[in-house]
C-alpha cells in the first residue's frame, strides 16, 4: 500500500512537471498550450505508456472542481470597465450564440453520425462553449496586443457561456436517459423554464457569495499565508451551494469572483498571485485527466465524420452564430470575423462530453470520442492561426508600455494602501526628469547599494529602485512613468501619426488649419470631445477618426475613458483589413453582389450587340444614303 502511494505520487507529479515544462515549448513556438497538455495525457494513457484510467465519475468530479477554480479566477481578474464595454455582445454570444451553435451543429451531427436528434443536439451543446484560456495564452506568447473591445468581448463571453452550455448538456442527458421523447413545444418550454431557474438561482447565490467573501476577508484578521486558501475554499463553497439548490454553480462562482475582484478586498495582490498559480494548476490537472481518460485507439472508427463536424463548427456554425448575435451592436467587420474564428474548443467541451457516459447513454462513448476529436481539430487549426489572423484583420495595436520592473507589497494592517517598488528603466519618463504625482508618496531610494530619502536624491537615474506608498487602487500613471519606451515595430512607426494634438484644444483650430469640414456645433467642442462624439460616445486606445484630409488617432485614454493623447496623420496609416470571406456574412454578400454585377455586364453587352445586328440589312446607313443621292 505504501509503495502504491509513492508510485502514484511520483507519476502524478511527473505529469504535472512535464506539463509545466511543455509551457516553455509553447511560449517558444506559439503552440496551443492546451493541445500539449492533452497530448501528454494521451501519451501516458491506455494507448500510450499504459496508465489505466477509465473512471468517468472521478474525471468529471476533478474536472468540475478545476473548472470552478478557473472561473473564479477569471471573474476575479475581469475589471468592471471591460464588463461594461463588452457586456452586450458577450452576453448575446453566451446565450443566443450557444443556442444557435447547438442547433446548427446538432443538425449536421444528425446526418453525419448515427445519432438521434436529441443525441445530436447533446453533442452540439457539449461543443458549443469556447475556451478563451487557450486564446489569451497564444496572444501573450506571441506578444499580440489586441484592441480592448475585442479582448473584453472574448473574456466576458468565455466566463459566461460555460454555465449555459453545461445546463443544456446536463438537461439533454437527463431527458435521453429517462427515455423520454417530448414534443418540440414541451421540450422548448421545459428548457426555457429550467434555464431561468438554474441561471437565476446561480446568479443570486453568486452575488450573495461574492459579497460574503469580501465581508469575511475584511472582518477576519487571518494570516496572509492562510488568506488565499480561505478565499479559494469560500469560492468552492459558493459553487457547491448553488449546485445543491438546483442553480448553476459555475455561474455562481464566476459572479462571486467578479464581485470580489472589483471590490476593495484586502490583500488583493496576494490573492491575485495565488489564484493565478491555482488556475494554472487546475488547467494542467483537468487537461491531463481528460487526456488520460480518452482512448485514441477508438478514434479511427469515427475520425472522418468527427473531423468534418469540427470543420463545420469552425467554418459554418460558429461564424453564423456570431454574425446573428452581433448584428444589433454594429461592430466592424474585422472584429466580427475575429470573434467568429476565436471559438476555440477546449477542456470544457471534453468535460461535458463525459456526462453521456455518466448517464449511461448507449452512444455515450461515440459522443465523447467525437467531442475529443473536434477539440483536437480546433486547437490544431484555430490555435495556430489566431495571431496571423489578428494581424491580417488589423486588430493588433502597438504596445503602450515597454518593459516594467515592479514589485507590489501590501502593508501589514492596512486594507487600502500598498508599497510599490519600481526600478527606474532607461529612457523612462522619470529618468528623463518627469515629476512623480503628489498623491504618490516616495519614501526610499536605493542607488549603488545605498539607501537614501527621496527628498535627498535629486533627479532619479536609470537603475534606481524607488519605494512609493500609494492607494491600493492607484492609477496607471505610475506604470507609465517608470516603464521604458515601448519597442515599436518599423511597420507601426507611423501608426499614431506624425504629430501630437492636445485633446483640450478647440476643434475650431482644426477647421481653421486643415478645413476638414466640421459643422458649427462640432467646432464648439474640444478636439477630444469631437473624436469621442465621432466614435459614438466611447473612445479606446488606437481608435481612429478620418476628418477630411487628416486622421486623428487616439494615443491614450484614462481610467474614465477620457482621451488624454491624440496623434494626427495626413495619410491614413491604419492597416487595411482583409477579411476572409468564410468568416463574414457581409463579405459573402459583397462577393455575391460583385459576381452578379460582373455577370450582368457581359449579358448587357451581348444584348446591345444583338440589337445592333438585328437592324435590317436593306436599311441604308447615312453614309450609303448620301452616296446614292
Image (cartoon, rainbow, N blue to C red):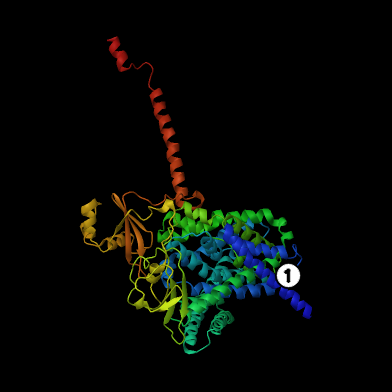
**Within 10 angstroms of label 1, few (less than 14), some, or many (20 or more) residues?**
some
Q: Nearer the viewer, residue 486 or 372?
A: 486
* Left or right of residue 237: residue 571: left
Quadrant for the N terminus in the image? bottom right
- Outermost residue on the bottom side: it is 220
Give percent across and percent down for residue 283: 60, 70
Residue annotated with mark 1: 54
Give percent across and percent down for residue 247: 55, 78
Q: Nearer the viewer, residue 411 or 426?
A: 426
Marker count (numbered): 1
Q: Nearer the viewer, residue 174 or 33?
A: 33
* Left or right of residue 500: residue 48: right
Based on the displayed image, in which of its 4 quarters is residue 170 positioned? bottom right
Give percent across and percent down for residue 295: 72, 63
Give percent across and percent down for residue 628: 30, 10
Quadrant for the C terminus in the image? top left
Q: Is residue 616 above or below residue 414?
A: above
The answer to whether residue 72 is seen in the rendering is no
Based on the displayed image, in which of its 4 quarters is residue 542 positioned? bottom left
Q: Residue at x 24, y 51 (%)?
A: 514
Q: Label 1: state its secondary structure.
A: loop
Q: Is residue 619 above or below residue 176?
A: above
The answer to whether residue 325 is seen in the rendering is yes
Q: Residue at x 41, y 56 (%)?
A: 332
Amino acid at each position: 500500500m505504501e509503495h502504491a502511494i509513492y508510485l502514484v505520487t511520483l507519476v502524478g507529479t511527473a505529469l504535472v512537471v512535464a506539463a509545466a515544462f511543455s509551457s516553455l515549448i509553447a511560449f517558444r513556438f506559439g503552440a496551443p498550450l492546451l493541445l500539449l497538455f492533452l497530448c501528454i495525457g494521451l501519451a501516458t494513457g491506455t494507448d500510450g505508456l499504459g496508465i489505466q484510467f477509465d473512471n468517468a465519475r472521478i474525471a468529471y468530479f476533478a474536472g468540475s472542481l478545476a473548472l470552478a477554480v478557473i472561473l473564479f479566477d477569471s471573474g476575479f481578474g475581469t475589471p468592471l470597465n471591460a464588463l461594461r464595454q463588452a457586456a452586450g455582445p458577450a452576453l448575446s454570444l453566451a446565450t443566443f450564440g450557444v443556442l444557435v451553435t447547438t442547433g446548427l451543429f446538432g443538425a449536421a451531427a444528425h446526418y453525419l453520425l448515427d445519432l438521434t436528434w436529441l443525441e445530436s443536439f447533446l453533442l452540439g451543446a457539449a461543443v458549443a462553449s469556447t475556451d478563451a484560456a487557450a486564446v489569451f495564452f497564444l496572444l501573450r506568447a506571441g506578444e499580440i496586443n489586441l484592441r480592448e473591445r475585442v479582448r473584453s468581448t472574448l473574456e466576458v463571453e468565455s466566463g459566461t457561456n460555460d454555465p449555459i452550455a453545461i445546463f443544456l448538456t446536463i438537461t439533454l442527458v437527463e431527458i435521453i436517459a429517462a427515455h423520454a421523447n417530448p414534443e418540440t413545444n414541451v421540450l422548448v418550454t421545459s428548457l426555457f423554464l429550467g434555464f431561468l431557474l438554474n441561471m437565476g438561482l446561480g446568479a443570486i447565490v453568486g452575488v450573495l457569495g461574492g459579497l460574503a467573501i469580501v465581508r469575511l476577508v475584511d472582518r477576519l484578521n487571518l494570516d496572509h499565508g492562510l488568506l488565499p486558501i480561505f478565499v479559494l475554499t469560500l469560492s468552492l463553497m459558493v459553487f457547491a451551494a448553488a449546485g445543491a439548490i438546483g442553480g448553476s454553480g459555475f455561474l455562481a462562482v464566476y459572479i462571486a469572483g467578479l464581485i470580489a475582484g472589483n471590490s476593495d478586498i484586502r490583500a488583493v495582490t496576494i490573492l491575485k498571485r495565488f489564484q493565478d498559480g491555482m488556475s494554472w494548476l487546475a488547467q494542467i490537472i483537468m487537461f491531463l485527466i481528460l487526456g488520460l481518460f480518452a482512448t485514441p485507439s477508438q478514434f479511427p472508427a469515427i475520425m472522418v465524420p468527427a473531423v468534418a463536424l469540427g470543420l463545420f463548427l469552425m467554418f459554418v456554425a460558429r461564424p453564423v452564430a456570431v454574425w446573428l448575435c452581433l448584428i444589433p451592436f454594429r461592430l466592424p467587420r474585422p472584429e466580427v470575423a475575429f470573434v467568429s474564428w476565436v471559438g476555440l474548443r477546449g477542456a470544457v467541451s471534453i468535460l461535458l462530453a463525459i456526462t453521456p457516459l455518466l448517464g449511461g447513454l448507449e452512444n455515450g462513448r461515440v459522443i465523447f470520442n467525437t467531442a475529443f476529436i473536434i477539440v483536437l481539430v480546433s486547437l490544431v487549426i484555430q490555435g495556430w492561426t489566431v495571431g496571423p489572423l489578428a494581424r491580417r484583420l488589423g486588430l493588433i495595436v502597438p504596445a503602450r508600455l515597454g518593459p516594467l520592473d515592479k514589485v507590489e507589497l501590501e502593508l501589514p494592517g492596512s486594507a487600502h494602501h500598498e508599497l510599490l517598488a519600481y526600478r527606474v528603466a532607461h529612457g523612462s519618463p522619470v529618468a528623463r526628469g518627469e515629476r512623480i504625482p503628489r498623491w504618490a508618496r516616495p519614501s526610499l531610494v536605493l542607488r549603488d547599494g545605498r539607501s537614501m530619502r527621496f527628498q535627498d536624491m535629486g533627479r532619479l537615474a536609470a537603475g534606481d529602485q524607488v519605494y512609493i506608498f500609494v492607494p491600493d487602487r492607484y492609477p496607471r500613471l505610475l506604470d507609465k512613468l517608470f516603464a521604458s519606451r515601448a519597442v515599436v515595430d518599423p511597420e507601426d512607426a507611423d501608426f499614431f501619426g506624425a504629430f501630437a494634438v492636445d485633446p483640450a484644444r478647440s476643434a475650431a483650430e482644426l477647421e481653421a488649419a486643415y478645413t476638414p469640414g466640421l459643422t458649427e456645433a462640432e467646432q464648439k467642442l474640444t478636439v477630444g470631445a469631437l473624436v469621442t462624439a465621432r466614435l459614438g460616445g466611447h473612445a479606446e486606445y488606437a481608435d481612429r477618426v478620418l476628418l477630411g484630409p487628416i486622421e486623428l488617432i487616439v494615443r491614450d485614454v484614462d481610467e474614465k475613458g477620457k482621451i488624454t493623447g491624440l496623434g494626427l496623420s495626413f495619410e491614413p496609416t491604419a492597416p487595411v483589413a482583409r477579411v476572409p470571406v468564410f468568416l463574414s456574412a457581409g463579405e459573402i454578400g459583397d462577393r455575391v453582389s460583385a459576381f452578379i454585377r460582373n455577370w450582368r455586364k457581359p449579358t448587357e453587352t451581348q444584348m446591345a450587340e444583338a440589337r445592333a445586328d438585328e437592324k435590317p440589312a436593306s436599311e441604308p446607313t447615312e453614309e450609303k444614303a448620301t452616296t446614292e443621292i
